[in-house]
Amino acid sequence: MNTQLGYVCLCIIWLWAPAVLDAAQSYYVTKSGNDKNLGTSQLQAWGTIQKAASQATPGSTVYIGPGTYYETVTIGVQGNARSGPITFTSLISKTRPIISGARAKARSSDEILNLIYMENKSYLRFVNLELANLTHTECSGIRIVGAGTQVELRNLLIHHIRGGGETGGAMAITVYNKDQRTSRSGLIIDNCTLHDCDPAWSEALTLNGNVEQFQITNNRVYNMNNIGIDFIGGESDMGALGTRSGRCANNTVWNIHSTYDSSAAGIYVDGGFNITVEMNEVHHSDAGIEIGAENKGRIASNMTVRKNYIHNNNKVGLAFGGYDQNRGRVIKSLFEANRLEYNDALRTGSGEIVVSFASDNSVYANIVKPNTQNIILYADRVGGLKNVFDRQSYYPNGVKATQSSLIFNWGNQQYKGLSAFQKATKQEMHATVINGKRRRKKK
Ligand SMILES: *[C@@H]1O[C@H](CO)[C@@H](O)[C@H](O)[C@H]1NC(C)=O
Ligand SMILES: *[C@@H]1O[C@H](CO)[C@@H](O)[C@H](O)[C@H]1NC(C)=O
Ligand SMILES: *[C@@H]1O[C@H](CO)[C@@H](O)[C@H](O)[C@H]1NC(C)=O
Ligand SMILES: *[C@@H]1O[C@H](CO)[C@@H](O)[C@H](O)[C@H]1NC(C)=O
Ligand SMILES: *[C@@H]1O[C@H](CO)[C@@H](O)[C@H](O)[C@H]1NC(C)=O
Ligand SMILES: *[C@@H]1O[C@H](CO)[C@@H](O)[C@H](O)[C@H]1NC(C)=O
């Protein structure tokens, strides 16, 4: 009897084992759950996201039920290449569970608070969650620190991360890696909505340090009190390796205004390398897209900025170049086929395009529709004149405006009219001017 039963049992185990290994493990967290449960079914659900973040196994999915979870979660687990990532997502597909910071308490004022925090982690996915209402001087919705690979943030809604101060900032998404040996790679941030945070003096969505092979796509970023999306390299406390080799595409960024210098760009590359910024829309911010290098000796290079729609920004549409003579330069980058419309809304005189400390860059085939100031360009006298401008299409603004209405500030000189600019600088030799409608005289 015993041996026979034993045989039957072994047989069942043998038959079931492959199926069990293949089936992805699921875990559940609900508002009515309890951390003493097993977590493996809805009836056995855990009560906190932190429990899942400490127990979930590689390849598993953590389903989080609707409701508000008052937690600050530290991710202690991760997936791997063989079993796959761990996914944290909503139990009910159209209802995002909320992680709220409304009851979070810092032990001291200089502690950094985060709704989700991870360090040196890989193979994790966060999908369809809402993170909100955290208030502290230095804090983030999600903070990803250190080296790692394959982390994805998708369909997240992050808002009201507030209270940022001069020493830090209340940021939506922070990615920092100062590990010089191993990069943070394979990062995807897609289809997220970030709004109403106080990131000053930091940024709403920032990648900083040894970060490569990233994709920041299809996100909406708005109502921020400093820079919207930022790619940083060269800050002294982050090591020499900067953010590089990635793509920022099809994001929409608006209402980005710096509280301290009114010069925040919607999308900013500060000392990055080999980054493509394309098909984004940036509007009604201090500045549209800026490629710079703030830190001493830093060179931002091989950037491609194309097919963006940049309009109605307060000070300038497109800006590139280092900060000043001693602080950074932008070289060998391409600015092509962007649409620049009605920027410098505050009529500061900088117009559509500002070039500071930059050389060997190409500005080609952009469509430029200035406001009635008709100011196209401001190129710095010392650092801005060794770049090539060609094949732009200009739309002079005004009933009788023509090519002669366009204003180009080139070093110490101001040229009134495209012809004058061409003649003096040999730039823009193949530009097109599309004049506004003019009254036709009757013959
Ligand atoms: C955030 O706070 C506001 C105001 O206190 C409140 O109305 C809202 O319900 C809160 N939302 C979350 C997700 O905690
Ligand atoms: C993360 O990695 C860095 C560099 O190896 C190490 O100094 C740090 O202690 C690690 N942190 C954790 C929480 O493992
Ligand atoms: C993007 O997120 C929205 C929620 O904001 C969702 O309705 C939509 O299905 C998502 N799109 C994709 C392609 O995942
Ligand atoms: C530049 O970035 C692309 C990805 O956008 C990558 O495939 C390529 O290898 C990078 N080039 C260098 C020199 O790092
Ligand atoms: C760009 O975003 C829009 C909506 O924001 C979406 O409909 C479209 O599919 C996206 N395009 C690409 C190429 O991802
Ligand atoms: C420069 O950027 C282009 C386009 O992203 C890429 O194909 C090329 O590999 C990059 N070159 C270097 C030297 O990074």
Image (cartoon, rainbow, N blue to C red):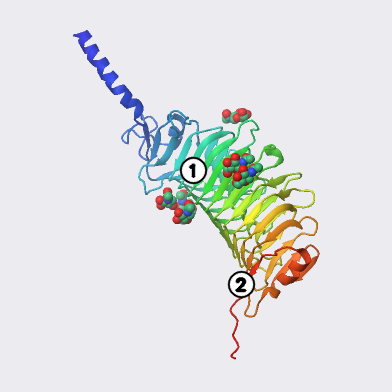
Residue at 46% over, 39% down: 125
| Residue identified by numbered label 2 | 434
Q: Which of 94 and 7 is in front in this view?
A: 7
The image shows residue 84, relative to residue 89, as above or below, that is: above
The answer to whether 331 appears left or right of 226 in the picture is right
Q: Where is residue 115 in the image (x, y as percent from the top left)?
A: 51, 42
Res. 153 mark: 1
Which residue, as the protein is rendered here, is positioned at the far left? 1
The answer to whether 102 appears left or right of 66 in the picture is right
Name the quarter where the C terminus is drawn: bottom right
Q: Nearer the viewer, mark 1 or mark 2?
A: 2
Residue at 50% over, 44% down: 103
Mark 1 → mark 2, Cα distance in angstroms: 43 Å
Circle 1: element type: strand
Amino acid type indicated by mark 1: Leu
Name the quarter where the N terminus is drawn: top left
Residue at 55% over, 55% down: 280
From where the camera sits, is residue 169 visible? no
Q: Which of 91 and 384 is in front in this view?
A: 384
Amino acid type indicated by mark 2: Ile
Q: In which quarter of the image is residue 441?
A: bottom right
From where the camera sits, is residue 361 visible? yes
Q: In which quarter of the image is ligand 2?
A: top right
Q: Position of residue 340 (x, y in %)?
A: 61, 63
Q: Nearer the viewer, residue 107 or 153?
A: 153
Q: Dot 1: within a 10 Å radius of its alpha carbon, few (fewer than 14), some, or many (20 or more) residues? A: many
Q: Where is residue 72 in the image (x, y as percent from the top left)?
A: 50, 39
Q: Dot 2: within a 10 Å radius of its alpha carbon, few (fewer than 14), some, or many (20 or more) residues? A: some
